[in-house]
Image: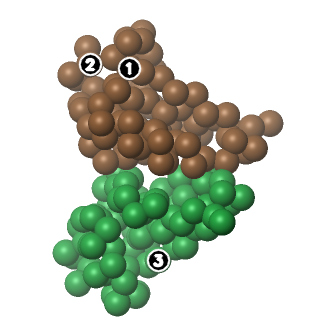
Chain colours: A green, B brown
């Protein structure tokens, strides 16, 4: 079964770059990658916070949060 | 031809986690991934800096630097 990766972003330029270069580079044969725009789907904010996400863009892989550069704090999206 | 990705680290716990979960998740069919320990190979520091790396762990994909969480500043490795 594929491992799960969630890419959280807010449409910011830093987010777009991370999505196109990092999230897009993940191996789709091993990972199911979901992309979540936290500015548009605020009901996913809590789940992101619980995974340890404090800013976007961030990748959560197997429940672990990896912030990729720095676009915006999660608090700005609430 | 495969695209190039370089994972820069310094053996720190944050680095190890990023290597095992993010660098390891890259699609090896599309990317050639090189792992560089900047604490042990200081002659690669300049190339990392020129790519925009300011802290480790960081992934440079197609010449663009993506810092993954925060382990140590590059200045601490000189």
**Residue pointed to by mark 3:** A36
Q: Are marks 1 and 2 in contact (CB under 8 Å)?
A: yes
- The answer to whether any part of residue A32 appears in the image is yes
Quarter of the image for residue A42 reads bottom left
Q: Residue B69 placed where, x, y %?
A: 31, 48
Task: State the residue in front, B46 or B13.
Answer: B13
Mark 3 element type: strand
**Residue pointed to by mark 2:** B77
- Disc assigned to residue B38: 1
Quarter of the image for residue A54 reads bottom left
3D distance between C-alphas at marks 1 and 3: 33 Å
3D distance between C-alphas at marks 1 and 2: 7 Å
> What residue appears at the point 58 percent right and 67 percent down from the top-left corner?
A33
Question: Height in image: A70 above or below A63?
Answer: above
Lower sequence index among marks 1 and 2: 1
In-image side of B6 versus B13 (left or right): right
Quarter of the image for residue B78 reads top left
Mark 1 element type: loop
3D distance between C-alphas at marks 2 and 3: 36 Å
Q: Are marks 1 and 3 in contact (CB under 8 Å)?
A: no
């Amino acid at each position: 079964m594929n491992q799960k990766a969630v890419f959280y972003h807010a449409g910011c330029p830093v987010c777009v770059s991370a999505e196109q270069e990092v999230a897009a580079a993940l191996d789709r044969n091993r990972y199911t990658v979901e992309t979540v725009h936290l500015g548009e789907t605020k009901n996913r904010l809590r789940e992101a916070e619980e995974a340890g996400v404090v800013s976007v863009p961030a990748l959560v892989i197997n429940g672990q949060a990896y912030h990729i550069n720095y676009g915006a704090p999660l608090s700005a999206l609430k």
